[in-house]
Amino acid sequence: MSFAVSMQQISKRYGTVQALDNVTFEVEAGTIHALVGENGAGKTTLMKALYGAMIPDSGTTSLNGNPIKFQNSADAINQGIGMVSQHYGIIGELTNFENLVLGSEGAAVLNKSTMSERADRLASSMGFEFNWNTESSTLSPAGGQKLEILKLLWRKSRIMILDEPTAMLSPQDADALYDSLKQLASNGATIIVVTHRITEVFEHCKRVTVLRGGVKVADHEVTNVTPSQLAEEIVGGEVIQRPKPVSLAKNSVRLSIENLSVKGEKGDSAVKHVGLQVKTGQLVGIAGVDGNGQRELFHALIGVAKPTSGMFSFDGNQWDTETSQTRILEGLRVIPEDRHEEGIIEEWSLFENSALGLQRLPAFSNLSKSTREEAPVMAEMFGTKHGGLDNEIGSLSGGNQQRFVAGRALRINPQMILAFQPARGLDLNSTTKVYQEIRRACNDGACAIVVSFDLDELLDFCDRIVVMCHGELSEPRPEEARDRAAIGKLMVGAG
Amino acid sequence: MVSFLLQVITMSSPLLLMAMAGYASERSGVINIGLEGKMLTACFVCAAFAPQFGAIGGVLMAILAGIIISLLHWTLTQIYRIDHIISGMAINLLASGATSFLDGSGFGKGTLSDAQRLPLPFYYGIALVSPVIWYVVANRTRFGLRHKSVGSDPDKARLLGINPQQVRFSALIFTGLFAGLAGSLLVSETSTFTKDMTSGRGYIALAALILGGWRPIPAALSCLLFGLATAVQIQLSGKPLFGLDIPSEIWKMLPYIVTLLALAGLLGRNRTPAGLGKH
Amino acid sequence: MKLKVLVLFVCSIIAIIVSLLIVKANVFQAITTIFTGSLGDARKLSGTIKEMTPLLILGSAVYLALKAGLFNIGAEGQYTIGACFASLAMIAIGGPVGIIVGCVVGVVCGALWALPAGLIKAYRNGHEVITTIMLNAIAWNLTKALVSGPFKGKDQPASSTSVMPATSQLTPLFKIGELEIPQSFVVGLACVLVLAYWLKKTIAGYELKATGANATAAKFAGVKTKQVTIKAMLMSGGLSGLAGALQVAQFEHRFYDGFSTGYGFDALGVALLSSSNPYYLIISSFFFGVLNKGGTALAILGIDKGITTVILAAVILMFAAIRYSKKEVTNG
């Protein structure tokens, strides 16, 4: 039987990193096939090769038995391969119609009436509905995902690659998405889903391939494997026993958020009347699907976004009226979501970056001296691998940048720790170390709020979990405080 | 009244052409501070070549020069990846220096006779029609759509198999074309080349483009607004206003002040294409 | 990367040589004249230093703005406004007091002239390149009108203020034979050194550099970026205004229509060439001084000064190409 997709012995090296090592990947036509693995396992890299966005060092690829060699994405698209990337490819400034047809316009002059007709037909065949003339910036994440699928259909893609398609979707929207995918598969399309969510694999996919460290570790029919087996294959060997979080929280409230509302990018109310009290020594995790207001809340607490109503205070200081600078002086420390945009200055050395965020603290009053002293300690904390602290931080890998940023945040007397996806780019051991350090600071009296889209991570490390859904904050009942199912319901708004 | 309207068109036309030149470049993601230099080069080339090549020849040479300089800007920003603003300023310097150098050494001197200039209404017609043409191109053609996509998000466009550098190459050819026309127009109006004769029109055209949110029709309206301001300045120049003798310089400042106020009170949302300056 | 830079270098050289050949100039003679005309003897060297002096201060002004992520194309206008109003103060008050007051006036006026651009950038995100270019044009017209009208000196025929009496003028710091070192030259050097120190050692300097390098990261780091932007423009404008005031006090002794010969634009080149290290401002100002002074000598050969502007543009592009090709390497 010839597979719809057959990739044989694909290898790719980036500098010193072997991203893919002799990987074989075969997919049957008309099925939904899962490609799983941790961050950095090589899933996206392998799919880039299939999509023509990357040329492998060695190996062959065939479609339906015919060997092919892609020079670029245009070649792949012409062969009927379509990819929906993690941060999807909808261009906000263009209209829905323009986004749909971009790249496959069909003719030099656009015949809007016939094209709109076809668009409507495709949309209704999937049960979708779109206003073609509105700007795509108004789409919700679920809407964007639907448009992406329509894009694939517009191009008559027969092989569809979806990279973490449910990352930004609520469990409901995710199920709806898979229903659409099943429909497509039953019509003969071949669907590859790259994911790290095991539940989805077992609920919706036929086969699963596991990558770990650039190597193909396993390949099963989903019915022939158990979730725990799969988890072990993904993580490899013993998972570090994460100690159950022990809370030494005292009863005094340090951070008090009352009735806080914040506007989102699109002018909507992203955070709605949120109230939260965090006690001394408490490590609070905010769970929820991305896009439910966590980011806006985070930004308001830091001071880069202004709330529209409500207030919050720390140690009695009215933080909502104070500048970020003052909050930092009063103990605010941040591990931001996007280190590249928000946390570091790529062209600067590690020395220079060590003061970023801390430059007004007394500890840094003599800038040159303090950066020389503190930078090595910050780097050491989580084992940042670097070629010298004088080097540009941009030369470090993403994970090492994250280690440095985390070290910097936790080094100088943290009192109120705000971390957004602190484990991003980090392996399991580093993640554990970072959380342990946050825990240590909390035991010394600080308090912390961590936002993560990985519920399991929060369950492992936080003493208290709250949920944000559609801008509102809720908390599971005490008896269900660590109940995955109960929290999941709150995440969807069904609790 | 008619003569006033005519004056508005006269004042606006170079701006309209340059704003279209700017649109072609900026909407595709290439910041273009160098409009001034491109226009100036075209002025000089037209004046230098029209005597020998005739009216049409002069304009064609000006267009060719505009395209060459435009592609220089493309090379610097897309191949060498130099900061777009530095590239634009350098091109302005280059044009200013080179044209005054050659002009001061005897090239491009002298006045153009009627036979060596195309009739001005030709230019005015193109100036008024081109925003409409651009509007249609932007919204109804494949090129226009890809042009916009590359200016809004070159990375996402790349994923769809579109080559931003290639699209920008074509875009900057259009920039050169319009700059060539604008420069020829200016020289045909005055019949002779003088140093730095563009006097900031390139910048005003860019301001009009920004005011118009990088869209052809609103940008064109902004050009007409600025043309109106200049026409008013000419009408009132030398005439006492409310019994006060106002020096001509105060009127000359009007377009610049209007631009400044407009930029300061910029209403509505920021429509800067998200991919401006991105590779 | 290196190949591309080499290609650019070769093309620039060819372009310059071809331009000179087109006007039937002797290329070798032209190039050597630029150097002999600027460095040939003590008097010419003094002339070069005279050209260099305002560029030291203006270069510092533009460099500071550049580090804050701002292109202050308006140095020209700020310089002009500063000079215009400073000249009045210096003429009216006279003596050393007049000069000091004049300098203060120059700083204040220059800063105020940069303020609109700073505010529009901070609060409206209006690009400072356009706003400062507009302000330049307004400055040019305004000062022309002022100096032809209310500011016109009684004994002056054309658009000019009166001339400062000799006792009020800034004398050269010292004179060895024909070599003159102006006092304002020392001020210029001081500006560069103070700027370099301020940027490297102070927290305010750190925050300014952070804002220029990555405004978002700076915000997350508690930097008040809007304030930094406005302050940077004010400081840049103030320095430019100071340069104008000193130019009046030391060299021109009056203000007139056509006072500014483009130093503000040269300053952009000076700053760009020094982008990695403020101390280089001294070297690049000198380089520009050589080109300016040497350029005037070309007139004797019948070559228009414009060729030096072309050389300037080529050098700026060369440096930019080298800097951006280095960036490519680190970003991989």
Image (spheres, grey):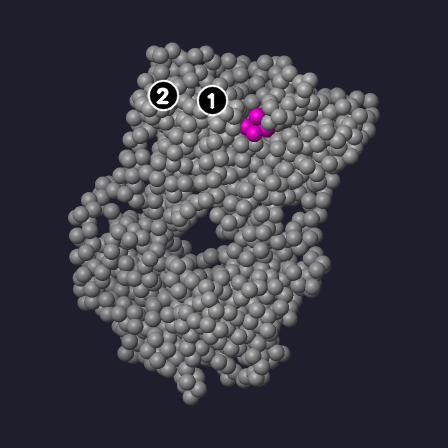
Is residue C142 inside the magenta stretch?
yes
Q: Disc 2 designates what residue? A: B59
Asked whether the viewer can see residue C65, the reply is no
Secondary structure type for disc 1: loop
Q: Is residue C155 above or below residue C215?
A: above
Spot occupied by residue A72 in the image (x, y as percentages of width and height): 34, 50
Residue type at mark 2: give it. Answer: Val
Our reading of the magenta stretch's main secondary structure is helix
Q: Which residue is found at the position 42% from the left and 88% from the top?
A: A479
**Part of the protein shown in magenta:** C140-145
Q: Residue furthest front?
A: B243
Q: Is residue C299 left or right of residue B37?
A: right
Q: Is residue C290 above or below residue A175?
A: above
Asked whether the viewer can see residue B58, the reply is yes
**Mark closest to the chain's N terminus, 1 or 2:** 2
Q: Is residue C20 left or right of residue B1?
A: right
Mark 1 Cα shell of 10 Å, populated few (<14), some (14-19), many (≥20):
some
Spot occupied by residue B211 in the image (x, y as percentages of width and height): 41, 40
Front residue of this view, candidates A438 and A404: A438
Spot occupied by residue B214 in the image (x, y as percentages of width and height): 38, 42
Task: Identify the disc placed on residue B239.
Answer: 1
Front residue of this view, candidates C247 and C21: C247
Residue type at mark 1: give it. Answer: Lys
Q: Which residue is found at the position 51% from the left and 64% from the top?
A: A336
Spot occupied by residue A273 in the image (x, y as percentages of width and height): 43, 71
Q: Mark 1 and mark 2: span between their CA atoms?
A: 37 Å
Secondary structure type for disc 2: helix
